Image (tube, coloured by chain):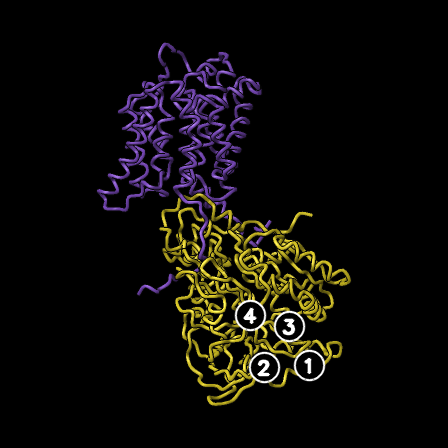
Amino acid sequence: MPHLTFKGGIHTYEGKDLTKDKKIIDLLPSSPELVYPLSQHIGAPAVPVVSIGDRVLRYQKIAEASGFVSSPIYSSVSGTVTAIENRRNVQGLMTPSIVITNDDLYEEAQRLNVRPIAEMTKEEVINVIREAGIVGMGGAGFPTHVKLSPKDPQKIHYVIANCAECEPYLTSDYRRMMEEPEKLVAGLKIILALFEHAKGILAVEDNKPDCIRLLKDLCLDEPRIGVKVLKTKYPQGSERQLIYATTSRAINSTMLPADAGCIVNNVDTIVAIYHAVIEGRPLCERIVTVTGDAVKYPQNYRVYTGTCYDDLIDAAGGFKQRPEKIISGGPMMGFALFDTHVPVTKSSSAITAFLKDPVSESVPGACINCGRCVDACPSRLIPSKLADIAEHYDEEKFVKLNGLECVECGCCSFICPAKRHLTQEIKMMRQNVLANRKKKG
Amino acid sequence: MNDLINVSASPHVRSRMSTSAIMFLVILSLLPSAVFGMIRFGFYAALLIAVCIASCVITEVVFELLMRKKVTAGDLSAVVTGLLLALNLPPSATWWMGAAGSVFAILIVKMLFGGLGQNFMNPALGGRCFLIICFAARMTDFSYDTFTGATPLAVLKEGGAVNLMDMFVGRIPGTIGEVSAIALLAGAAFLLIMGIIDFRIPLAYLLSFVLFMGTFSSPGWDMTYLAAELCGGGLMLGAFFMATDYVTSPITKTGRVIFGICCGLLTGLFRVFASSAEGVSYAIIISNLLVPLIERITVPKPFGKGGEI
């Protein structure tokens, strides 16, 4: 069977060889301070439930969800709350955060109240997931319990585990699948139990053949779960493209995956669901890949949320030379950092550091209308025209040429021979249009 | 300040392909035809090619210096224009005709409309048509050395017979770069394999042209005649190297098919019904003018709204 895919997309230098064979190393925070931004998810920021001076334990809730689309935050260490103030996050913004000074005792609080899975009702399971503070750990940080509460659960036909990991250089999901595949499958079964009519799909790119074999073997006795092999191409792991590749269903910007009868979750998110529902552990750790040609010993780490990025970089031996660019996440969608003194959050997947920065070296030239961006766009848009329109800020024309359908994947900027900043122009315009719409109500 | 690191919005990697790399590959692909032209028509053809390229580059640089703009000759697009123009000149064209055509192509057609990416018609073809209007007799005089005689297309137009093998290899009168179909096809294959040009434009162009000629010309579906029409004149050069110019062809895939069909039908129309034997240049230029319209009606459907298949 030909491997599943979508139209468009790009092939980049994968860079996964740096860390794909590096076993996950447990890393305790070395800086005494751990920082927990109150907004680590899409939706309303969490509200602190501790005050300065309080002693907190590991797995203790320090901030409560402030609405349905919101998520609580837990302390990953035991220690004292030393500040609730603005701290820098990975986007470079100062945001309200809880600061805890680690006492290195790692004393644990009471875990979440869970019963054997067979005895729990669906509502209880979703409630545990919500209480555990689980959000999409692939990068977007959408609260998982919201995803798992569609209008009509009977109409969910597919629960897709996003094991594509199409972002170059990242290997955190890959290592998780190689080392704890049974947790992934068990986590997927927990979700499947919520939707009677759903089939589970483990969607893996064909550059991970060992992983595909492993998962296939594990799923031999799972009638409801199948492994689907995807072509290796960026952005294969983008939600819309993944749903299309695995189910031939297509959604646009105005629809949710549930509208096409699908629910998509990232590998780490599903494992977090397993930890919460089976072991009662709230979300306060994740796998982070530290990689790039500037890093001395690229590595995959299991770290506590709140750990400073500097700790991870130090653990990886620091930099060979001063990097020109440090990215939180991968090179296609990550945030460039100007300060590495920022905390690991629920959705930090990697730190990538490069000796050379191709973006600052290339000078944008004139568009030659070559159409490479049109070929690469997974949303089937005309990026070069949209970027022109964005430069002139023509809202009406931007919407007419479907600019709002952009998924900001970065393919057009990557492929452009004139080195234009297409994604950036379109992204900014798109966000402005959406903000204006919100204002108008 | 030394320890500052770069910050920019994602993506943080770029593909290796650049505008100048694309232009370089186009130049490479034109080399078989150019070299063939030089061998067949001798030193003067080589001189013409050199004059055209030099005048194109100099015009662009001088204009940009005078206008206090950034000099963009490094993108090699002016070299491509000069080379294409030279390949479209008869070997008997004078050097100053080449220079005049080059200045027109770069200055009027390209730079005055905003430079690379803004021109609405193919600069090389613009330059060639300018020369045809100014020096009609010289531009259609293909006599060379002792060899005088009509081009195969003119012979065909009069109902005569031509040697197909000669046309394929290039033992015929014609412009410097158009005579050898095999050299042009080798270059075209290179461009297609390297992913520089889209097969849609040449395919739609040649197919619709053959259909038109088969239907409307007097010999009709005579295979030798159709093959001769395909190899004759500037059709191969036009279909693979001129019509596929990025700037003056549609950006959408459906648009490219429509554009190719326009070129093919117009070429057929000119060759069958017009007084001249050739019509590729005008067909492409007129189709160039239709590009904005074609692009407007062929905006693809986005993903999730029917455009995913």
Query: Same subunit under labels 2 and 1?
Result: yes
Disc number lying in front (4 or 2):
2
Local SS, label 1 = loop
Above/below status of A32 relative to A387 = below
Residue that label 4 marks: A142
Furthest residue to the left? Answer: B66
Query: Same subunit under labels 1 and 3?
Result: yes
Q: Which tag, 2 or 3, sits closer to the chain's start? A: 2
Q: Amino acid at mark 3?
A: Ile
Q: Which tag, 2 or 1, sits closer to the chain's start? A: 2
Disc number lying in front (2 or 1):
2
Q: Which tag, 1 or 4, sits closer to the chain's start? A: 1
Furthest residue to the top? Answer: B146
> Do we see residue A404 in this rendering?
no
Q: Amino acid at mark 1?
A: Val
Q: How many angstroms separate mark 1 from mark 4 (CA)?
A: 23 Å
Query: Same subunit under labels 3 and 4?
Result: yes
Query: Same subunit under labels 2 and 3?
Result: yes
Residue A344 versus residue A157: which sits nearer the camera?
Answer: A344
* Number of marks in picture: 4
Residue that label 3 marks: A273
Q: Amino acid at mark 2?
A: Tyr
Q: Colour of chain A?
A: yellow
Q: Is residue A126 left or right of residue A408?
A: right
Residue that label 1 marks: A114
Query: Same subunit under labels 4 and 2?
Result: yes
Q: Colour of chain B?
A: purple
User: Can you tell which quarter of the image residue A181 is in?
Assistant: bottom right
Give residue A408's position: percent from left, percent from top: 48, 59
